[in-house]
Image (cartoon, helix red, strand yellow):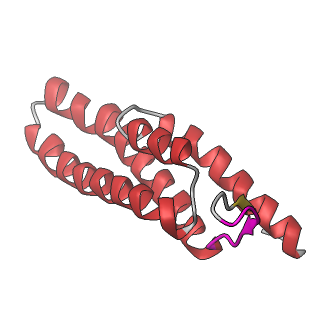
Amino acid sequence: MGYDTVSGGLAVINRNYLRWLIIAGLIEGTSTLVLFGVAMPLKYYAGMPMAVTIVGMIHGLLFMGLVAMFVIGRTTVPLPQRLMWWGIVGAVLPLVPFIVDIPLYRMLRAEDAHIGKDV
């Protein structure tokens, strides 16, 4: 449950978008690990540069999508501005998307507890 600073009351959270944002963070974070842990070793140790070309392109698209989702999520969910920036900056660093998903999941759990649903 978010706090709406404009009206001074509780904001309604877009639970569906928040779920998709969490999933996108998991997928983008996994693509980073695949790029660094699989594709780059294949390039440098097995002489397969095409692995980085393919995985790198997929990762780049997922990265841009995650950044766009955080920017859109600022008003759609609504996300706190600090969390939006943490998500954008975190998308650049390995493993950080998984860490950013923790407060997103907590937002979802808090909203579920507020309306009496299980995740």
| Nearer to the camera, 103 or 83 | 83
Q: x, y percentage for residue 45? A: 18, 24
* Range shown magenta: 7-14
Residue 78, placed above or below residue 42 = below
- Is residue 8 inside the magenta stretch? yes
Residue 18, placed above or below residue 83 = below
For the C terminus, the image quarter is bottom right
For the N terminus, the image quarter is bottom right
Q: Residue at the top extreme?
A: 45
Residue under the point 46% across and 59% down: 24
Residue 40: image quadrant is top left
Residue under the point 50% across and 52% down: 26
| Nearer to the camera, 6 or 76 | 6
| Nearer to the camera, 101 or 41 | 101
Residue under the point 34% across and 36% down: 92
Q: x, y percentage for residue 8? A: 73, 61
Image-based side of 80 in relation to 38, left or right: right
Residue 11: image quadrant is bottom right
Image-based side of 26 in relation to 58, left or right: right
- Is residue 71 inside the magenta stretch? no
How many numbered marks have been drawn onto this rendered protein structure?
A: 0
Q: x, y percentage for residue 44? A: 15, 25
Residue 32, placed above or below residue 20 = above
Principal secondary structure, stretch drawn in magenta:
loop
